[in-house]
Each structure stands twice: as C-alpha cells, then as structure tokens.
Amino acid sequence: MSSTRRGFLTGAATVGGGAALGRRVVAFLTGRSMTAYAALGGMSTAQSAITHGPFVGHLTSTSATLWAKCSTPGLYYLTAHGIGGREALVATAEATPDNDMCVVWQVTELQADTRYTYEAAYQDQPILSDVDTFFVTPAAESAPTLTRLAFGSCAYEDRESSAVWRRMSAVDPHAIVLLGDTPYINSTALEVQRTRYAEFAAVLDFADLLRNRSLYATWDDHDFGANDTDGQLDGKANARRAFIEYHANPSYGDGDHGIYTKFRRGGVEVFLLDTRYFAGTESSPVAADQPTLLGRQQWEWLRQELRASTAPFKLLASGMIWNGAVRPGKPDHWESYPHERAALFRFIGQEEIPGVVLVGGDIHRTRVLRHETTETAGYPLLELITSPIHASVIDAANAPHPALVHDSGEPHSFLLITVDTTVTPAILVAQFQNAAGRELHSLTLSTENLSAARETVEGTIRRSE
C-alpha cells in the first residue's frame, strides 16, 4: 500500500520514540527465536513478531519496497525516518495465511540519495527498531555515480554459503541479484515451495546482508520446480505464487504469468529474464515452427524495454547460460533455442542498442565468453557466468568453446559488477571472487567497447534482409 507522510504514527504506537525502545532490537530478527528474544525482556512470545527479514527490495530515488514474514495475521506498519528523524513516512501491509504471512511495504515520497531508518509495528505494538535497519535511496538515474551489484547463483543454507553472504556484505554492494537455484526446492507443491523459501530466508548471514541493501531475483530450474525443466511443468502457478510471496521485485512478468522484471541503478539497467515459465509452451515469436524460450509477451516486453533504456550498460541476466558448450544434448541453455538467441542478437544490432552484457549462472563454474557477434549485434557480446555460491563444483563443465576467455572451478564464488559513470566514457568492471576475497578473474569494459560503428550496423541490417 502507499505510504503517507506525517510527523508521528497515529492509530499505532509511535515507533522508536520511547526511551524504553532506544536503539535496540525489540522483535524477532532474521531467524532468531521469539523465545530467545523474550528471554531478553523484549516481548512476550504471545505477541506478534517479524519471523523473517525484514529485507530491502526494489529501491528508486523516490520509493522503497521492503519484505518481511510475520507470525500473526493482521496489519503491520512500517515507518521510515529521514535525516534527523523529524518526519515519518508510514506504509501498511497485511499478513494473512493466504500470503503465507508475508508482507511487502511500499514507501513513497522519498528523497533521492538519502538514508532512511525504518521501524515496524503490529497494531499498537512496536516490534522492530534497530540501528542496522536502514536503506539509502539511489541518486537520480542521470547523476554521475558509482554502482556496485553482486550476482550469485546456486546456494544452500550452510556455513559455506554463509561465508559468501558475509563477503558480499564486506564489499558493500548496493544490491544483490540472485540468478536462481536460491534455494533448491525441486517441487511445485505450494507448501514445499513456501517452506524452502522460509528456510532460505532464515539464514542469519543472508538476512543480515539484506537488511539495508536491495535484493532482486529470478529463478532457474531447481527453484522453479524440477531439474532441467521447462514451462510445461505441472504446478508452475504454485512456484510463481511462492516466488512472489517471498520477494519484493519491481514486478512479476505481465502481472499474471512469469516473473521477468527489470531495475535501473545509476548507469546500469538489469533485465532479469524468466527462462523457465514460458519455455516450450508455444511457438517462438521469431520462428513459428520452433518452440519459444521467452514466450511472446516476454519477448515483446524485452524488445520494448531495451529500445527505451537510456542506461549506459544493460545486463541481460538469466539463470540459464547463453551458450551450449557445458550442457550438450540438454535443453537447458540459450543455444537450445538458437532462433531466439540469434534474433535477440540481431535486434540489438538493428536497433543500435549499446552497452549490452550477458549474465548467467547455473553450471557450478566461473566462466567468461566473448562471442563474435559483430555482424549481428554490432559488437562482441561478453557472457559472464557466476556459480556456485555453495561448495559443489562440476569439473565436467570445464568444456571447450571457441569464445571462452576464462574458466575456473571455484566453490563459494560470486560476481561483483561495478559501473562508474563519474568518468567518460563510463566503465564497467566485472570481478569474480570467492568467499575469502581472492580474485578469480576480472575485466574492464567501457561504453566504447560495447557500441557499433554505424556503417557496421547498417551492413548487418542489409545482410539480414
């Protein structure tokens, strides 16, 4: 629901205003038990509490979305305080059994590039106030800025994965982007989906990471519902429902189907593609005699949004990888749908869309490929693959490919992308590192590397016609 601006909460206790609350936690936080908290004298176990989160979701320069899971049905209030805490912005959301007690607060009327603390209440009972519950709104999109995004895939609820969450926190990205198999579910039964998302969200280091920075996500096969599956999977509506309940993305597909979305942060726009829900369910929009990967609606959305994007860098991110070297004979990569991949690359060239970089996960290896796409896209497209966060590396996935630039089988790894628009031309630095902070590979691109000479693009268009 929309937030309202006022000096103090009305209809609920003033959150954080009493000396008794001070700056301490007054509710269940990030998976800690209510019994343990009650022992500190903070609350009775009979009272309502936040059982998971809160996590920061989508942020813009004027709005914030936050997620939490609660213990008791009813209305929950979230209050955001700006500089000095003199004025409050209040949002409400309702927890019900129908949404598995998950709430998503939408706070609006915020100021750009501003730090806000936030507090929560249930009815007239304050349940959350802590020094570490804050978010910072981004600067305006056009403002020169430095943006850090951490990408990862394939994680368990174990100590090794937690080491990656801690390392991500240390490098202090503005947002975390999960590319799927986060968590492993392998079922479309609604209660299984909900249980697994709740178990994943209860990991303390994961929750600590997201209390004051954004989380964005798409899915891959195991969280969608089954290994190597496509959109013909029975029960996929349950998977979509649970995904929406447990995330605070900007949007979810067309509103009824799929979970694709996008977000802009500084000089980079990330297109989070859904390569599961629609795959194999209809004819491709670019080849009527072939199956689709993205589906007609997502295909048209992607074309429209790429045309409209003014970001210097545009990341096309999916759980699937963009090449077929690692998974020959499997329908589990973009090259299983070569007609759609080729059409996308041609579209980038024909529309003269600069700054495109491909991102994927899934295969339990770190890999970088430089695809020779100058004649179609207008410039070489880089593919950045990051996996796994957990410990399971697949040695057999070290497969040859003519475009391969780097391969390493390193557990507990992730990708940090830094985009700097304070310099001209703008640059993107991609650094793969492990939980100990050791660099596995890095590369630097400028906008000049990712744009086509007009003569080249025009020649490509004539050849394609």
Image: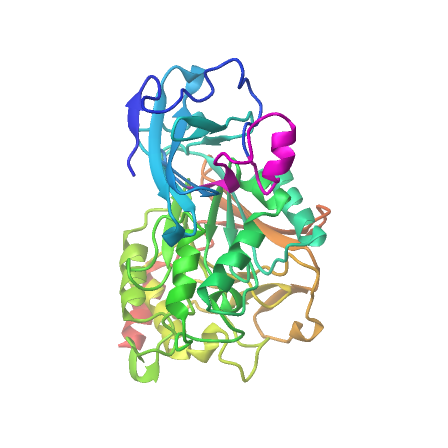
Direction from residue 119 to residue 294 in the image, left or right: left
**Nearer to the camera, 450 or 441:** 441
**Nearer to the camera, 341 or 349:** 341
Direction from residue 2 to residue 421 in the image, left or right: right
**Nearer to the camera, 86 or 387:** 86
Residue that appears at 44% across and 30% down: 120
Whether residue 293 is in magenta: the answer is no
| Residue 306: percent from left, percent from top | 32, 56
- Quadrant of the rendered image containing residue 83: top left
- Quadrant of the rendered image containing residue 11: top left
Direction from residue 320 to residue 366 in the image, left or right: right
Whether residue 31 is in magenta: the answer is yes
Q: Is residue 348 above or below residue 265?
A: below
Please give the range of residues in magenta.
28-57
Residue that appears at 56% across and 20% down: 23
- Quadrant of the rendered image containing residue 9: top left
Direction from residue 283 to residue 24 in the image, left or right: right
The C terminus: image quadrant? bottom left
Count of all numbered marks drawn on residues in the image: 0
| Residue 249: percent from left, percent from top | 40, 49
**Nearer to the camera, 121 or 356:** 121
| Residue 264: percent from left, percent from top | 38, 45
Q: Is residue 216 above or below residue 30?
A: below
| Residue 233: percent from left, percent from top | 42, 76
Q: Is residue 194 visible?
A: yes
The N terminus: image quadrant? top left
